[in-house]
Image: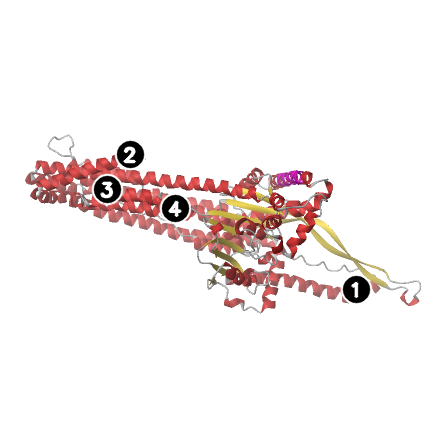
Amino acid sequence: MIEEQSSSLLKISKGYELLGSSLDANLLAELQALASNFKNDALHTQNENRLLRIGIIGQIKRGKSSFLNSLLFNGQDVLPKAATPMTAALTKICYAQRPKALVEFYSKNEWGKVKNLADKAFTKQASYENAFLEYQANKAISQKQGVFIPSPAKPVISDEEKASIELLNMVKSSGLNVAQYLDTTISLDQVNNNDELVDKLNNYVGASGEFTPIVKSTELHLNIDSLRDIEVVDTPGMNDPIISRGRRTQEFIGQCDVVFVLSNSGQFLDQSDMSLLAQNIPNKGIEDIVLIGSLFDGALLDEYHKYPSIQEALPAITTKLNNQAKSNVDKVCNEFSAHHSAEDDNNQSHLMSTLQNALPPIFISSRCYDLAIKPEQSLNEEELHTMNLLNSMFDDFTFNANTFAAVANFKKVTSKLDTVKAKKEQILADRFNNLLIGSKREVKQKLVQITDDVTYKRKNLLEGDVESLAKKQQAVVKRVEAGTVKVNRVFEKYSIQAEKTLTRLLTDINQDAIQVQQVQSQSGSREESYTTSREVSDSSWYNPLSWGSTRTVTSTHYRTVSYTYASVHEAVSKLESFVGDTSKAIYDVSENAIQLGLFKQDIKASIKDMFDFSDDDFDPEMVLMPLNNAVERITIPAVNLDLDAHINTIRQQFSAEQVEGDDIAQLRTEQARVVALLLQDISVELKQCINQIVAKLAEEQSNFVPSLTKDLVASVEQLKQDLTHKEEVLKGYDDVLQKVNTDLATLSTNL
C-alpha cells in the first residue's frame, strides 16, 4: 500500500522533471520533496506503530512466565522464572532475525538507594538488639526491686528495606564486583540460536544468576515467528523499590495496545494485586485490559470434590470465580471512591472503570495447555504430577488433549488478541489514509501554483513586449522598495505578538507549578505485631530449689494502627505530568505564537496596498505571482523542548513507594526543590525560544523585499530567454498545463 501510493506520487513528480525547463525550479523541488516526504512519513508511521504492544502485569508466583511461554512460544520454557519478587527484572521481548539480548544494570544512584534502604534496616535492627541486651541485663535487677520494664518492640522493616537487604545478600554471596557494571548496558549477541541466548540470559535474570540482583531491565530479541509484529513488556511482579524502574514500567505499559492482568483464580484481584495495578498502569492511555485468572487447574483441584462430575464442576467453579472476581473488583472500587480525594478519584477513575468493563475474567491454565500439546513421554515431573492429580478427580473421567485444551482456555485469550490486533490495523489504516489525503492535498496545491506560474509566463510570452514589461516591472520594484516600511511594520507587529504570547505562557507555567509543589498526605491503616512480656512462676512443687523462681513469657499480639503517608509515585507522577504538559504547551504555543496564515495575509495586504488594482493598465499577476512565491518561503520555527533530562533527574530523587511521618515533610521539601529547578531551566529555555523566533522573524524581514524584487526582475529575464525559442517554450508550457490538468483530475478522483 505504501509502495503503491508512494510510487503514484513519485510518478507524478518525476513526470515534471522532463518538463523542468518550463517550470520554476523552486516549485519543482518542492513538488519532488512532497512526494519523497510522503514515503518517508508513511514508513515512519508504520514502523512506529505497526507493533502490537502487549503488557503483562501480575505478582510473582501468578504464572506470568508460564502464561507467556504458552501464549507466545507454544509451551517452550523461553522465559526464565525469577527467584524472588525482587529479582524480577523488567523485560521487553520482540522479534529479530538474529537473537540477542540487551541487559541494563542499575545506575550508581539507584544502587546507592538500595544500599541506603538496607543500611536503614540494619540500623533499626542493631538498635533493637542493643535495647534488648540492655533489657535482659536490667531485668533481674528490676524484678528484685519490683519494677516492671517492658521489653523493646521489634522494629518494623518495610518491604522495600527487606528487598534491598535481599539484593545486597545475593551480591555478597556471589562476590560480584558491582561497581564494574553499574551505569552500563551489555549486549549478549555472540549466540547462534534462541536456546543459546536463553542459556546465557539465565546468568543475568535466572533464579541463581550471578548478575541477577543488579539487573534493572532486559530486552530480549528472539527469532520466533510468533513474535513478528508483536512487542511484549513483562513487568516486575511487585511494588518496585527502584522508583526509576517503576516509572520505566509505566512508560512501557502506557504504550501498550492491550494489557493482560494476571491474578490467581482462587484469590482474584486482592489488595496486593490492586496496589500493583495502581503502581504500574498509567492514569490514561490504556485502551484494553484483559483480566486473566491464572492457575485455574489449582482452583479446580481445590473445588472438584463438591461436584459429582467434571461436566458440572467446570461451569459451576467458573461461575463461582466470576462472582468472586466481580465482588472483589466492586469492593476495591467502592473503597477507593470512599477513601480518596476528588483529585485522586479523577486520576484513577479511568483504571477503575476499565477494570469493571473488563469483567468477567478469562480463567486459564498454562499447565493444562502444556499437557494438551505435549506428548506424554516428554512431560517433566511436575507436569506428570499435575496430570495424575487431575485424572484422579473423577473415577469415570480421564483427560485427553481436547479436554486439557478446554480447561486451558487459551482460545479465548488468542481471540482477544486477534480482536485488538484488528483494531490496531484499522487505526494504522486510518492514520495512513489521513496522511495520504493530506499529502495529495498538498500536491494538488503545488500543482495549482505551477499552473498559475506557467499561465503567467505563457501570457507574457504571447504578448512578447520585453521593453514594456521591463518598464512596468521597474515601476513595481521601486514602489515595493519604497513601501518597505509597511512590510517591516507587519513583521514587527507579529514579532511583538510572539514575544508577548510566550512571556504570558511562562506566567501560566509558574501558576501551574504551585499545584505541582503540593504533596497530599493520606490516611491508611495496617496490622502491626508487637510483643509483651510478663514474669510467671517457674517453681515446681517437686523441686524445692526452684521455689520462688520466675521466668519471662513473651507473647506476640496484633493490632490495627492508623498512619499518615504520602505517595512518592503520585508525587513523581505529578512532576512528570507537569514536565510533559509544559513541554507540550511550549511546543503548541511556539508553533502558534505567530499564526502563519494571518501573518502571510497581512504581508500580502501590505504589498497590495501599494498598487491600484482597478487600474486597467496595471497587471495584478505581475505582483501577485512573485508575491505568493516570496510569502510561501517564509517559515517560523516551532520549538520542541527536550525535557527528558529533567524527568530522569526526578526519578532518582526518591527511593520508596510511600513515606510516613517526618519523611513527608522531606518529600514536600524535595518536591518544591525539584519544581524550582524545573522552573529555572524552563524559564531559560523559553527565553531562548523567544529569542529564536524573534531572530527568525528579523531574518525573514531583511530577506523578504529583496527576495520579492528579485522574483520581479527574474520574470523579465525569463521572458527575454523565452522569446529566443518562443514556439518551443510555448509548447513546453502547454505540455505542463496539460499534464497538470490530468494529474489534478487523477488526484481528485482518488481522494
Q: Where is mark 2, residue-wise?
A: 748
Camera-nearest label, 2 or 3: 2
Whole-angstrom CA distance, mark 3 to mark 4, is 30 Å
Q: Which mark is residue 45?
A: 4
Do the residues bearing badges 3 and 1 touch, measured as CB atoms within 8 Å?
Answer: no
Q: Which mark is residue 631?
A: 3
2 or 1: tag closer to the N-terminus: 1
Camera-nearest label, 2 or 1: 2
Which quarter of the figure has residue 426?
A: top left
Residue 325 within the segment the image draws in magenta:
yes
Give how far across and how far down residue 517 sits, in percent.
51, 48
Q: Nearer the viewer, residue 126 or 497?
A: 126
Amino acid type of the residue tagged 2 in the rendering: Ser
Camera-nearest label, 3 or 4: 4
Whole-angstrom CA distance, mark 2 to mark 3, is 26 Å
Q: Secondary structure at mark 4?
A: helix
Q: Where is mark 1, residue-wise?
A: 139
Q: Nearer the viewer, residue 308 or 49?
A: 308
Whole-angstrom CA distance, mark 1 to mark 4, is 75 Å
4 or 2: tag closer to the N-terminus: 4
Amino acid type of the residue tagged 1 in the rendering: Lys
* Segment colored magenta: 314-330
